[in-house]
Amino acid sequence: MKRLISQYLFLILGGAIILLGMVFAGITFLNHNPVNDRVMISVPGAKEVFLKAGKHHLFYEFDSKQFNLGVLQLKKEEKFNNITNLVTVKISKVSDNKEILLAKDSSMNFTFNDTRGESLYSFEVVEEGDYRVEINPTIELPKAITFSIVGDLANSLLGVFKHAGIVVSMSISISADRVVHVCQRSKKEETFNTVSRL
């Protein structure tokens, strides 16, 4: 039995290390998820927000519900098509009224409960501080719509995996040390048993 365990010890330890890394990454992402810290803006309207330096995304949020009817799944979304043509967006620093350049960017999206967010623009904040976000419709809209500003999701995910990698690396080195120690001890015991038989 000992020999069987020692043969598969690396596989067992490797699986445990990978599982530990995945659990750690999930917990870290849930605790530092930028979607939880998003700033919501109702349109039409303006809002002053504090933004940290770095990349941010402006998301259009709408209701998105899924209905599971056994073999059939239905999805109901209440959204405007081509929303960028229906609103004007201006983000400027409060202190000097300097406008931030917005770049069209639809590369990110998120789903949070029954709310779906699709990125419309990305922008870079060079200096953290208070910023004024103005979003106004170009035509009269039948209902109020919601936008949100979210910190960089991609870098947050990379940060989570970096932290998980550190934990896995530390676990590997500790586990390797233990395995080497166990192997050396078992070899000494085998040598001792062989010598004592002679």
Image (cartoon, rainbow, N blue to C red):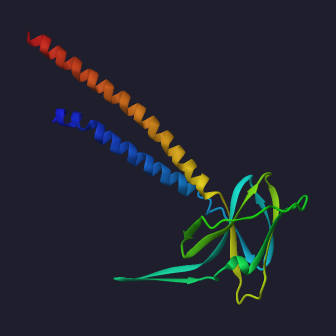
Position of 3 with respect to 183 (left or right) is left
* x, y percent for residue 38: 67, 64
Position of 9 with respect to 121 (left or right) is left
Considering only vertical position in the picture, is 184 above or below 100? above
Judged from this view, the residue extending furthest toward the left is 198
Q: Quadrant of the N terminus?
A: top left
Considering only vertical position in the picture, is 116 above or below 10? below
Task: Name the foreground residue: 176 vs 121.
Answer: 121
**Residue 70 appears in which quarter of the rendering?**
bottom left
Circle count: 0
Position of 65 with respect to 104 (left or right) is left
In the image, what residue occupies the spot 44% across and 50% down? 22
In the image, what residue occupies the spot 32% across and 26% down? 180
Q: Quadrant of the C terminus?
A: top left
Considering only vertical position in the picture, is 52 above or below 47? above
Q: Is residue 32 visible?
A: no
Q: Is residue 57 visible?
A: yes
In the image, what residue occupies the spot 81% across and 61% down? 100
**Residue 130 appears in which quarter of the rendering?**
bottom right
**Residue 101 appears in which quarter of the rendering?**
bottom right
Task: Name the foreground residue: 62 vs 89.
Answer: 89
* x, y percent for residue 191: 18, 15
In the image, what residue occupies the spot 42% across and 37% down? 171
* x, y percent for residue 131: 82, 62
* x, y percent for residue 186: 23, 23
